[in-house]
Image: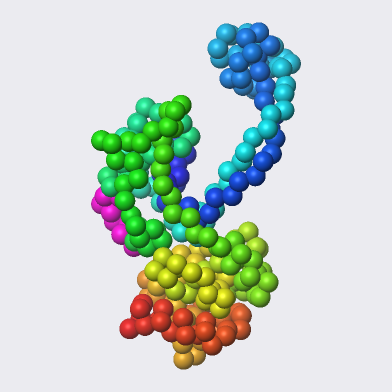
Amino acid sequence: MALWDKERLLGISVVEDIQTADTQKIRRRCRACGRANIKARKGREPLYRCQSCGAEFDEPIVETIDIRRYTSRHDAAWTALDTTIDGDRLRALCVSPRSQLSMRPLKWVEFRDELAASGIERALARVLARAPEEQDPMPADDPTTLGGGHSLATVRVRRGQQKFREHLLAVFGERCAFTNETPTRALEAGHLYSYAALGEHHRHGGLLLRRDIHRLFDDGLLAVDPTSLTADVAPSLEPYPQYSRLHGEPLSVPLRDQQVEWLEKHWVEHRS
């Protein structure tokens, strides 16, 4: 998935989980035509103006409707790329460039090649590693569509990720393995191995990592020396004091033998 603000690409990730819940929301309708496409105005009266019939009014028709809310979790692989592709180019990479929908299918192969050409191969490889069955989910020459103009796409869902994170929080508390106390909202459940390759959660196969630390660990820029169980910081991070100061420091959490074994494999992959 790619997230943008209509002006530029903000970042890319993989949808790890999708949760659904039945809830309610307030819907406001035009008093004249009954349409719902009205919007409150700032600094003008009357407060509302209908975009369909032009009617103006201060009090819309208000109703409560039942809805199903879908919430995605995609923080594990999130990689910020906020200067890579501008809004016009990103629109051109959509299957339907003129679409006004909030969610739009991408021409994945072209999008991937555009990112690779921007020189961010490492970040792209990390995201692709979490979706090894990489494919263009919506080829431009053969789209699969549903009624109402929506497009059908297949996403890879990582089952059990939330329980894995809750388990690590119960064991370690609000503590990043490298930087110590960290607000829960900024902590991620980091696997010490490639989940994409194994496809399962090991009880002692992860650590809580601050978001930025998680990215650097996945890239191998941060590692743990298995002989001393201290942080090892890659030379490319030396200009950044917030990371360079971690070099040689012991981890802030106790480790089990299984975790040390995974960290040793990570060390061999990125340091040997």
Q: Main secondary structure of the magenta part?
A: helix
109 vs 233, nearest the viewer: 109
Residue 90 appearing in the image:
no
260 w.r.t. 79: above or below: below
Q: Residue at x 66, y 8 (%)?
A: 32
91 w.r.t. 264: above or below: above
Residue 153 lies left or right of residue 23; in this view the side is left
Q: Position of residue 200 (x, y in %)?
A: 48, 69
40 w.r.t. 261: above or below: above
User: Is 113 a magenta residue?
Assistant: yes
Q: Residue furthest bottom?
A: 227
User: Is 92 a magenta residue?
Assistant: no
- Quarter of the figure with residue 220: bottom left
Q: Residue at x 42, y 71 (%)?
A: 198
Q: Position of residue 25 (x, y in %)?
A: 68, 32
- Quarter of the figure with residue 110: top left
The boundaries of the magenta stretch are 112-122
234 vs 206, nearest the viewer: 206
Q: Position of residue 249 (x, y in %)?
A: 53, 83
Q: Residue at x 36, y 36 (%)?
A: 144
Which quadrant does the C terminus fall into?
Answer: bottom left
Q: Residue at x 61, y 80 (%)?
A: 253
